[in-house]
Amino acid sequence: MNMRENVVLHVADVHKNFGGLHALADIDLAVEEGKTHAIIGPNGAGKSTLLNVIIGRIPPTSGAVVFDGEVLTGKKPHEINQLGVSRVFQTPEIFPELSVLHNVMTPAFAKRDGAFRINMTRPLDGEAAIREEAEAMLEDVGLAERIGEHAGALSRGDKRRLELAMCLIQKPRLLLLDEPTAGMSRHDTNTTIELLKKIKSRGMTKVIIEHDMHVVFSLADTISVLAGGRIISEGLPDAVRGDPRVQEAYLGGAH
């Protein structure tokens, strides 16, 4: 691949095998700083496996992941998080027994302390600066009026926004989003699109996996299409939309 100077994430010739199953093969992916790069494809294409390789949850069989010049391969997930990479999961990962406010304050403390270790007994109210930052973040995601509620009582859409606030308070340079609108109503989906556009305006780099093509084409600067663990098409949204290989593998059959 002809690498450009503004590439912040490079997945370099990554392969991942599970026994005899080739989940990923010849993956070469370059994500430009400040851009939104969407990864689409049918179920079983390898999208979530690719994200898990990037964040260190599973090791590649071969190849490397490089973020801002530093090799991530072999690092643990919390070490990768410390370097400025955060992920919003397909199923929201929150602390349902904590308040909405404390859900956002907790990762801020963990980030400050040098590792993502959650101390559930910490007296969270003691740090005024972190509390103020968390309140501002909840204002950004539209949850300011619910800061005292238990997070477990939120709707799926609100849990997704809460998890996003929990990531953003860590000030990541790269945000990975795995199906961020899954299970949402159209209203919640559109609200999430506008929120992600606002994040983009601040210059944050994003990689997004998403089945909803309305979301993809509303947000993506570049799209990579996976099928059978390989990238079969990549480029600007309009070019990918018109690629017959994409229509055959994914868009035409599913939408």
Image (cartoon, rainbow, N blue to C red):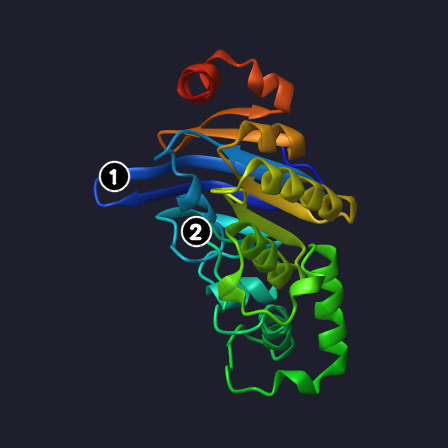
Residue farthest along the left direction in this orientation? 20
Image point 30% across, 37% down: which residue? 22
User: Is residue 152 or residue 49 the one in the foreground?
Assistant: 152
Image point 56% across, 63% down: which residue? 81
Give the amino acid type for the residue marked by disc 2 in the picture. Answer: Asn
Number of marks drawn:
2
Q: Is residue 35 left or right of residue 27?
A: right
Identify the mark nearer the N-term, 1 or 2: 1
Q: Is residue 161 visible?
A: yes
Q: Is residue 145 above or below residue 53?
A: below
Q: Dot 1: few (<14), some (14–19), or many (≥20) neighbours within 10 Å?
A: few
**What residue is shown with label 1?**
21
Q: Position of residue 177 (x, y in %)?
A: 55, 47
Q: Secondary structure at mark 1?
A: strand
Identify the image quadrant of residue 103.
bottom right
Image point 72% across, 76% down: which residue? 130
User: Is residue 116 or residue 69 the one in the foreground?
Assistant: 116
Q: Position of residue 168 (x, y in %)?
A: 66, 59
Q: Dot 2: few (<14), some (14–19), or many (≥20) neighbours within 10 Å?
A: some
Q: Position of residue 212 (x, y in %)?
A: 52, 32
Q: Position of residue 221 (x, y in %)?
A: 67, 32
User: Is residue 25 or residue 136 the one in the foreground?
Assistant: 136
Q: Is residue 221 visible?
A: no
Identify the image quadrant of residue 181.
top right
Which corner quadrant holds the N terminus? top right
Q: Is residue 152 left or right of residue 22?
A: right
Q: Secondary structure at mark 2?
A: helix
**What residue is shown with label 2?**
52
Q: Is residue 211 above or below residue 114?
A: above
